């Protein structure tokens, strides 16, 4: 789900502070107010389209990479766990690294941010395509997938971080930036649905071969190399390549529309005159802020729960429930349900408060997960659970971005002279979430290895089916309950939020003193 939701607030407000302006680029004197910069609907749509590539590729990799590595590329589960963990962990580290590099960039004729988007795009689509290509040298497969998975995550970060920061530099008017962000959120949500639909429907049309008796997988694979099984496996590989090609093509189209339809405003850089505090000092202050620690701890557990479901859902549907030809439709049901219920949760949190929305929205998945764990395989019930899970997924991935600004407001009241800390709040939430995602995928795939997972088996041993049921039902339930318990410690309720808002308004209405120099 919409990974980039809310990220613009953190990246945009602090990635490119005025400290990166070269001496000759700084305004020599205070300029007279300029006319409001109005963005046309076309400009906003062109900007919003740029959010789709990150969401499409993220959904395709999140839902399908594990089953692709195990059953199509035929990587053993232990090696697959290494690939998935290292790839996600590397993705977590690249966000602050790329953000730092961008902050040191100089202004060019294309702007400061656009060159990163332009030059990363062709390399990113090549790396993405090669992730879904099965090389002819089995002994080097682990290095192949590690290399191109990590390379793609780096390159897509080089696209998405400057794109998120671009929000602040398409206009100097806050109202115009907010409007463009609303367009972006809509397109990003649609991007998650599009990525799931394209990957799922194309791959789902292929007749994925399996071995009736995979006890001796190596011998069975060798014996089947000249049979219909080999032909079907080749068709499945081609289906994954076709899906990758379609998504890569849309990636390029969106990047071209973004570059041609959006102009980076240099004036927006010149209006940011508050010097940020040094990074490590800001990090120390942020990590000692109690509400932030409690919030990310609670959402870390709930996010882990839904990541376990996301990463293992295809295998669970295929082997535990026996819906080999239905899992792509079930995935689409989840994403469509999440998409259509996001406006509901937006309304709900404004009416009843964000903590109430957390408790009701995230806990609503628990009864349905219990239902899946207890009943026998039933397609109708599974579709009902998929729709219900989508409702809860929407709440789980929307609410963090809604609650983080409240934590930042609370921080600013306690540290009114600490400027430029916003990107630390957002980037480290993303960092912890991505790193935890890598741990969850690595551990879950390793668990399947210990349970005796059989590559390309038409069915799996009972321990594997039981392990998948634990990973998709009971483990997420425990993590959700732990997360909700941690939310009890979160101190910012609706009354506290209103008090902070009034205090910030009073603080902003005072005459501003000269900004303190960063030490």
Image (cartoon, rainbow, N blue to C red):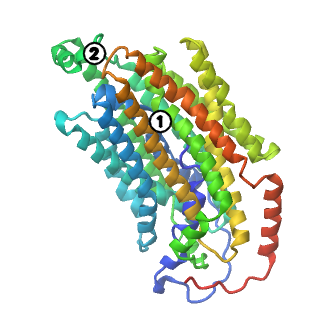
449 on left or right of 429 = left
- Residue 479: horizontal and vertical position, in percent? 59, 37
| Image: 374 above or below 500 | above
Residue that mark 1 sits on: 195
Nearer the observer, disc 2 or disc 1?
2
- Point 70% across, 42% down: residue: 358
Mark found first going from the N terminus, 2 or 1: 1
Q: Nearer the viewer, residue 217 or 175?
A: 217
- Point 21% across, 35% down: residue: 135
Q: What is the C-alpha distance between the residues marked 2 and 1?
A: 32 Å
- How many neighbours does mark 1 have within 10 angstroms: few (below 14), some (14-19), or many (20 or more)? many
Element at badge 2? Answer: helix
| Image: 322 above or below 291 | above
3 on left or right of 88 = right
Disc number at residue 423?
none
The reply to whether residue 278 is visible in this rendering is yes
Residue that mark 2 sits on: 214
The reply to whether residue 110 is visible in this rendering is no
Labels in figure, total: 2
- Point 67% across, 62% down: residue: 408
């Amino acid at each position: 789900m919409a990974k980039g939701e809310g990220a613009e607030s953190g990246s945009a407000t602090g990635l490119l502070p005025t400290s990166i302006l070269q001496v000759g680029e700084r305004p020599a004197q205070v300029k007279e107010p300029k006319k409001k910069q109005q963005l046309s609907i076309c400009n906003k749509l062109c900007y919003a389209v740029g959010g789709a590539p990150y969401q499409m590729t993220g959904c395709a990799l999140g839902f399908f990479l594990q089953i692709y590595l195990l059953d199509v590329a035929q990587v053993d589960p232990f090696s697959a766990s290494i690939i998935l963990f290292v790839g996600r962990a590397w993705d977590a580290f690249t966000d602050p690294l790329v953000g730092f590099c961008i902050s040191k960039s100089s202004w060019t004729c294309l702007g400061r941010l656009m060159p990163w988007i332009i030059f990363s795009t062709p390399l990113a689509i090549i790396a993405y395509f090669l992730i879904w290509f099965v090389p002819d040298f089995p002994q080097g497969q682990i290095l192949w997938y590690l290399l191109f998975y990590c390379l793609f995550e780096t390159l897509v970060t080089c696209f998405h971080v400057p794109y998120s920061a671009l929000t602040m530099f398409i206009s100097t008017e806050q109202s115009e930036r907010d409007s463009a962000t609303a367009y972006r959120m809509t397109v990003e949500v649609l991007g998650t649905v599009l990525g799931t639909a394209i990957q799922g429907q194309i791959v789902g049309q292929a007749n994925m071969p399996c071995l009736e008796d995979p006890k001796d997988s190596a011998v069975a694979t060798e014996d089947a190399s000249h049979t219909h099984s080999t032909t079907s496996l080749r068709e499945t590989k081609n289906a994954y390549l076709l899906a990758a090609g379609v998504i890569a093509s849309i990636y390029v189209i969106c990047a071209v529309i973004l570059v041609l339809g959006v102009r980076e405003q240099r004036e927006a850089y010149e209006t940011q005159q508050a010097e940020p505090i040094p990074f490590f000092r800001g990090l120390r202050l942020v990590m000692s802020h109690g509400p932030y620690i409690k919030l990310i701890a609670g959402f870390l557990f709930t996010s882990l729960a839904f990541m376990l479901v996301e990463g293992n859902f295809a295998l669970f549907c295929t082997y535990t429930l026996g819906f080999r030809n239905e899992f792509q439709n079930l995935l689409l049901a989840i994403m469509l349900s999440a998409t259509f219920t996001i406006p509901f949760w937006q309304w709900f949190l404004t009416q009843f408060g964000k903590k109430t929305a957390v408790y009701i929205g995230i806990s609503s998945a628990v009864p349905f997960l219990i239902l899946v764990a207890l009943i026998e395989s039933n397609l109708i019930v599974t579709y009902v659970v998929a729709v219900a899970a989508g409702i809860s997924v929407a709440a789980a991935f929307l609410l963090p971005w809604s609650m983080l600004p409240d934590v930042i407001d609370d921080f600013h009241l306690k540290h009114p002279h600490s400027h430029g800390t916003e990107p630390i709040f957002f980037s480290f939430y993303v960092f912890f979430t991505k790193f935890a995602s890598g741990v969850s995928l690595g551990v879950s795939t390793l668990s399947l290895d210990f349970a005796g997972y059989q590559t390309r088996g038409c069915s799996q041993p009972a321990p594997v089916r039981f392990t998948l049921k634990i990973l998709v039902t009971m483990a997420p339930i425990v993590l959700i309950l732990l997360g909700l318990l941690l939310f009890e410690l979160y101190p910012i309720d609706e009354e506290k939020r209103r008090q902070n808002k009034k205090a910030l308004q009073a603080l902003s209405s005072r005459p501003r003193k000269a900004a303190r120099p960063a030490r």
